[in-house]
Amino acid sequence: MFRRLSSLIFRSSRKSGSARKAVRGAARAARSGWLRRLLFLSMFVGTPTALFVGVAQVPASLLDRLPAEVRQGVRQVQHGVGEVYGMLEPVVSGVLPAGRFEDLSDLLAAVLPEGWRPSVDPVPPGALPKTATNWASTRRTLYEQVYFDRRQTFYCGCAYGADNSVNLDSCGLSSLITQSRALRVEAEHVFPASQFGNFRRCWREPERFNACRDDSGKVLPGRECCMRTDPTFVTAHNDLHNLYPAVGYINAQRSNHNWGLVNAFAEQYGQCEMRISPLLRRAEPPEATRGAIARTMLYMRDTYGFRLSRQDEQLYHAWNNQHPPDDWERLRNRRIRALQGLGNHYIESYRRLP
């Protein structure tokens, strides 16, 4: 069945010579998980390849100048290309070990991107921190009690004021002055909320929860549903250990991309060393932030039972070893421990990881 379907899609795309039919087919299949992935994969076998890869390489600086409808279409193509790459990359890069997997979940964790893994609602292995129950209070605590004397964004080192307005000239981002979101600080989830949300049924299947409907009966999106129904998600979402002040525009461009190394086509923003590839759906952070990112990702895995691929764990171990915590990272951890009752042991008991 799979072979026949792939063959039909391949012949159709070859005969038409048009990427438009492939896009329509992918859009019609969007409601079906496995069919959507299969159609996207088959689409890239035919002649639309060059067009799709070309569109996926459109830099953010150019994308922002396009009309809204065109911009939305390009982002949909970029997302589709990224999903296909995310599925194939672990195989072609030799990530899969030659030995046996411990179980099927290990195989899925190694092969599939986070967004395609089964929803398992992992039970946290230990005591959880005491975080705020709403997002507004969480952000206020981050800015006023953790970073009150260090108003500097995480990735780009931009100075910002007590009103959370960013001084773009202080960090070589003056070219973003026309981007309204670049003028304000936002609380960035280093471990993206959508990624750990995908481990929760409330995010993946909000229609199953009676509390996740508005007065008209419309199903609420995953984040809203989880904030209403899942205490573990709320705690993880508002955990200050996972939150860092970032330039809003950079936060938006990073989106929910994984961490890693990118290629020469990645977008860079002014003098900021943050580089982001929409095609790979990956962000390469400045070296000065890599150790803190690694220890944050490992803390979130250990605290909430979220899963990381073996490839990710190897990367974070390397970053942890290459970039030990500095005085500010240790002070930040102490402040958060005082607020939440739980510290990050990868900082408090720092050691090199195998």
Image (cartoon, rainbow, N blue to C red):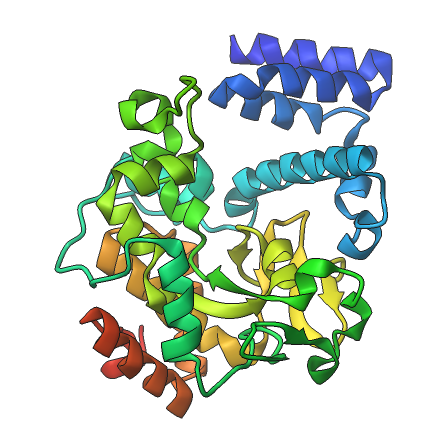
Residue 326 visible at all: no
Q: In this view, does 55 lie to the left or right of 32?
A: right
Q: Is residue 270 left or right of residue 342?
A: right
Relative depth, front residue between 139 and 198: 139
State whether residue 293 is above or below residue 262: below
Residue 167: x percent and y percent? 68, 78
Residue at the spot 85% in from the left edge and 20% down from the top edge: 18
Quarter of image, res 102: top left
Residue 81: x percent and y percent? 66, 37
| Quadrant position of the C terminus in the picture | bottom left
Residue 62 visible at all: yes
Residue at the spot 58% in from the left edge and 60% down from the top edge: 251
Residue 244: x percent and y percent? 46, 69
Tally of numbered discs: 0
Quarter of image, res 168: bottom right
Residue with the most extreme bottom position? 327
Relative depth, front residue between 3 and 60: 60
Q: In this view, does 151 lie to the left or right of 297?
A: right
Q: Is residue 122 left or right of residue 66?
A: left
Residue with the most extreme left position? 126
Residue 224: x percent and y percent? 40, 38
State whether residue 350 is above or below residue 68: below
Relative depth, front residue between 183 and 347: 183
State whether residue 227 is above or below residue 49: below
Relative depth, front residue between 150 and 83: 150
Residue at the spot 77% in from the left edge and 66% down from the top edge: 176
Residue at the spot 37% in from the left edge and 47% down from the top edge: 196
